Image (cartoon, rainbow, N blue to C red):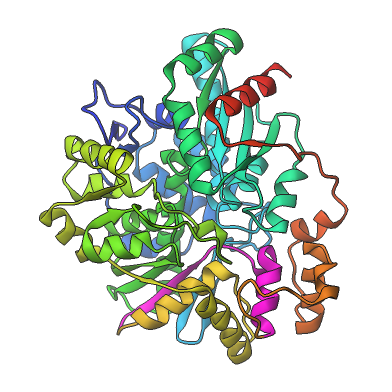
């Protein structure tokens, strides 16, 4: 029997299958879906994974979750997800740098770790639509509605472009993403895509999109007028989170096979964290049998998770939103924390619902003693300010000729502080070329937000990357980044961060 899925905020009337969950995205209660139980891998199975290509590793782990796809279909879809669309055959190489291991998750078509999920999820989504149409004899279409802090938007657009039965609309904070991130989204090809800037920060975008999902009247209008249902590609969708579990399991098996760790040896993992999806995937990998002792949450100056993990008190009251050089971590409301709390408090949906209500109404909540003990057992936390971030980029390049992006640099800084006797793995979430201006500042010893030299300011993001690569004698810049130099801009529209205006934008897109 397939493993069923339950809701973090309500008692399930029935268990849903994986294909139901991927299409639905978010529960009608406003809660998130999680598996009713977590499968366990034996030490023998974990060791054997290293002998498989990455797509087979992914297929094996999906089969462990007993998803409602036949084995051959799972393998076919995973092979389509992880192949020549990545620029290295091994998909997730691990670099040994200093006394740490850096898991490079940025070799996909948009040079960000989001590709690890968003090259996979759309293939299963498209297959689920076809299956639903055959089972129910209907022709329902889906609209993927995404709020992004930068990388998710492009990765989702690239994954869902020209998929059958699907359109995708992405909202991002106006002037809140890097030049490269903007151009990656604004130049997106495909007949079924749309990109709109919202005036506000990422939390504003995310909250507005959540309201759209929970608006039953609007959802009924979309179904009646356009025969279209909303779904999500953000990590609030379990199918976005699930592929991320794979790479932590794969990474451990690779270290084991390479002799970098001994059988049964525990490791620690440090994850740069914003919306808590990537780090939650690491926790699920641990529960599936990977011997991870400490999971270290690395924050930037928006360090709400640092405070929460150390105190059990989550609060955004009187907390300023800070724009930093690691914008994908500029988040105060970490959506996937809800799943983590649900797991740690014994699937007590009543309690989770109360915490989420308090966060919505009072801007804070405090977890109980038992849940805090469970949290503290698995997690520790640190944070890195922008000066430390840029200094870390320069230090590692000067000492090891290894160039990091600012998000990875935050994790590197925190990992160095938290490094104990265990081997430490760092999740590297983006290629440095996505954040060229701040990498330039770092390499040249400049201060955060310091105005760049006039000749550098005159360059586009791609031109700056090429300049840096030449200066540092770096041969590799991803083709998808270099191609932006001549790619035509398709999407320039910006609107106020108003739910009604977002609804109007969605309706206008569906009418095209």
- Residue 484 picture quarter: bottom right
Give left or right: position of 436 versus 430. Answer: right
Can residue 43 be seen from the camera position used here? no
Q: Which of 226 and 106 lies nearest the eye of the viewer?
A: 226
Who's the residue at 24% across and 44% down the image?
Answer: 342
Q: Residue at x 80, y 61 (%)?
A: 482
Which quadrant would the N terminus be assigned to in this image? Answer: top left
Which range is magenta?
Answer: 421-444
Task: Answer yes or no: is residue 413 visible.
Answer: yes
Q: Residue furthest bottom?
A: 399
In the rendering, at what x and y percent does residue 339 appear?
31, 45
Residue 441 within the magenta-colored segment of the rendering: yes
Q: Where is residue 394 in the image (x, y as percent from the top left)?
A: 61, 84
Residue under the point 83% across and 74% down: 454
**With respect to residue 231, does 378 lie above or below?**
below
Instruction: Describe residue 145's horizontal placement relative to residue 61 as left or right.
Output: right
> Where residue 41 sits in the image (x, y, percent)?
30, 55
Task: Examine the image and state in which quarter residue 251 appears.
Answer: bottom left
Q: Which image quarter is the C terminus in?
A: top right
Relative vertical location of residue 377 with respect to residue 233 in this rendering, above or below: below
């Amino acid at each position: 029997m397939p493993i069923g899925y339950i809701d973090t905020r309500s008692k399930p009337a029935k268990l849903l299958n994986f294909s139901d969950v991927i299409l639905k995205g978010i529960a009608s209660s406003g809660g998130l879906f999680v598996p009713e139980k977590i499968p366990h891998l034996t030490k023998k199975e974990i060791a054997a994974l290293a002998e498989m290509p990455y797509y087979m590793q992914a297929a094996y782990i999906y089969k462990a979750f007993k998803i409602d796809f036949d084995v051959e279909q799972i393998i076919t879809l995973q092979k389509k997800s992880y192949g020549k669309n990545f620029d290295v055959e091994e998909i997730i190489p691990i670099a040994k740098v200093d006394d740490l291991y850096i898991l490079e998750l940025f070799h996909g078509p948009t040079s960000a770790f989001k590709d690890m999920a968003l090259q996979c999820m759309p293939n299963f989504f498209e297959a689920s639509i076809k299956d639903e149409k055959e089972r129910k004899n209907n022709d329902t279409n889906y609209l993927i509605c995404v709020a992004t802090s930068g990388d998710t938007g492009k990765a989702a657009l690239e994954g869902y472009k020209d998929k059958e039965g699907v359109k995708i609309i992405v909202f991002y904070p106006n002037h809140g993403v890097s030049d490269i991130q903007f151009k990656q989204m604004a130049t997106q090809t495909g007949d079924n895509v749309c990109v709109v800037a919202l005036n506000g920060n990422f939390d504003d975008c995310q909250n507005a999109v959540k309201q759209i999902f929970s608006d039953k009247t609007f959802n009924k209008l979309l179904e009646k007028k356009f025969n279209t249902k909303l779904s999500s590609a953000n990590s609030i969708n379990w199918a976005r989170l699930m592929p991320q579990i794979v790479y932590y399991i794969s990474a451990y098996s690779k270290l084991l096979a390479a002799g970098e760790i001994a059988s049964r040896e525990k490791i620690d993992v440090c994850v740069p964290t914003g919306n808590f999806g990537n780090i939650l995937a690491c926790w699920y990998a641990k529960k599936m049998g990977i011997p991870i002792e400490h999971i270290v949450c690395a924050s930037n100056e928006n360090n709400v998770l640092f405070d929460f993990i150390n105190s059990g008190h989550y609060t955004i009251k009187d907390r300023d939103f800070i724009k930093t050089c690691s914008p994908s971590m500029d988040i105060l409301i970490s959506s996937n924390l809800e799943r983590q709390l649900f797991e740690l408090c014994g699937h007590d949906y009543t309690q989770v619902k109360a915490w989420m209500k308090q966060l919505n109404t009072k801007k804070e909540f405090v977890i109980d003693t038992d849940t805090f003990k469970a949290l503290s057992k698995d997690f520790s936390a640190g944070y890195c300010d922008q000066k430390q971030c840029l200094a870390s980029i320069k230090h590692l390049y000067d000492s090891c000729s290894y160039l990091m992006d600012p998000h990875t640099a935050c994790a590197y800084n925190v990992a160095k502080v938290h490094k104990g006797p265990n081997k430490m793995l760092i999740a590297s979430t983006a290629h440095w070329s996505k954040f060229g201006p701040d990498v330039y500042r770092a390499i040249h010893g400049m201060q955060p937000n310091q105005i760049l030299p006039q000749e550098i300011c005159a360059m586009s993001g791609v031109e700056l990357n090429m300049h840096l690569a030449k200066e540092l004698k770096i041969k590799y810049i991803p083709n998808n980044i270099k191609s932006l130099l001549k790619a035509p801009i398709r999407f320039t529209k910006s609107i106020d961060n108003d739910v009604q205006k977002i609804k109007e934008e969605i309706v206008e897109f569906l009418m095209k």
